[in-house]
Amino acid sequence: MILGSSIGEDAALIALNRTVLVLKTDPVTGTSADIGWWAVHINANDVASRGARPRWFLCDLLLPDGTSPAAVDRIMSQVGKAARQVGAAVVGGHTEVTPTLRRPIIVGYMVGLVSRRGYVTSSGARAGDRVIMTKTAGIEGTAVLASDFASKLHGKIPQRTLIRAQRMSRQLSVVKDATIALRTGGVRAMHDPTEGGLLQGLWELAEASSVGFHVHESAIPISPETERICSILKVNPLRLLSSGCLLIAAERQRSKKIVNSLKKNRISASIIGAFTDRRRGRRLVRLSGKELEIGPLERDELYRIIEKHRPT
């Protein structure tokens, strides 16, 4: 084994002759909408963040009593469509009825391959490297909130804005982001921020690399849809599920080239700060200029809102 599980390292690496096997598993528990789609992409993202190509997908589908065959077909159709998008084959899994469940749960498993010299970990960031993020903060959480809390948001947000927010789930994949960044060169580490949002993802990457960081709130892109929904539900978008955004630690001299390469391929990207010596702390420079020390988060904003406003 090259790498097992640890903070910030979301996929295992196993040496296999001249290649490296990348193994990842993750469930979908925060939503009941499009769970087949989510399951493929959140697992493929962590494989791609290792520099690997997602190849084979399996899933466990756990269903409440009374689930119809049509519902199973719908979920597996989502799985098939998402797998084709990332270039993976659906090779197996398991389905069962679990009486205590109130809604379906899917646990995905993605396997990828990468060359012995081609893999990337979350532990490669160095002081002086630039922090690049693709797309915007809170993508996954925005799509989930827009879908699962549509009735609560109705009348408070224009319908077209709500629809755009729901469609943000189509931005979930970072496979292309990772591929372009690695092809450009200068990537030291990559990480897919999920639970705890962008700030938790930054902390995990820094923790894995034993470095600090200084990032600027003014440089972090947030979509208008995310801003509007987070304002209504009183959610911090920087602490909201952020699958779809890729964090990249890049050599300072190559960072602008990586950003330009991503933009040329119609993927928005921004340099939001730099990694520093660990002793300088892990800090977010707020819009006010005040510096906020960033530590690990116990719970994502999505789950707090689910508990507070769970739809009935």
Image (cartoon, helix red, strand yellow):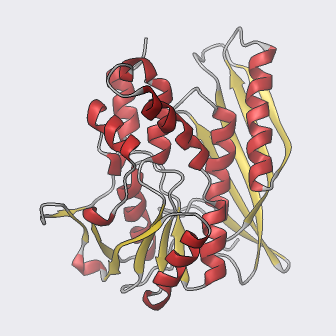
Query: Where is residue 162 shown, x and y percent of the image?
Result: 45, 31
Task: Tally the marks.
Answer: 0
Q: Residue furthest bottom?
A: 253
Q: Quadrant of residue 203?
A: bottom left
Judge from the rendering whether residue 67 lies leftward or rightward of residue 149; answer left or right: right
Query: Where is residue 34 shown, x and y percent of the image?
Result: 64, 31
Judge from the rendering whether residue 197 lies leftward or rightward of residue 51; answer left or right: left
Q: Nearer the viewer, residue 50 or 85?
A: 85
Q: Quadrant of residue 275?
A: bottom left
Q: Nearer the viewer, residue 80 or 168?
A: 168
Query: Where is residue 305 shown, x and y percent of the image?
Result: 35, 30
Question: Could you tell me if residue 50 is visible in this image?
Answer: no
Q: Quadrant of residue 213?
A: bottom left
Query: What residue is rendered at 44% in x and 55% in y?
Result: 136
Query: What residue is rendered at 65% in x and 48% in y?
Result: 41
Query: What residue is rendered at 69% in x and 26% in y?
Result: 62
Question: Could you tell me if residue 233 is visible in this image?
Answer: yes
Q: Quadrant of the N terminus?
A: bottom right
Q: Quadrant of the C terminus?
A: top left
Rendered position, 239 above or below 278: above
Query: Where is residue 222 shown, x and y percent of the image?
Result: 37, 52
Judge from the rendering whether residue 231 lies leftward or rightward of residue 39; answer left or right: left
Query: What residue is rendered at 67% in x and 39% in y?
Result: 37
Rendered position, 275 above or below 243: below
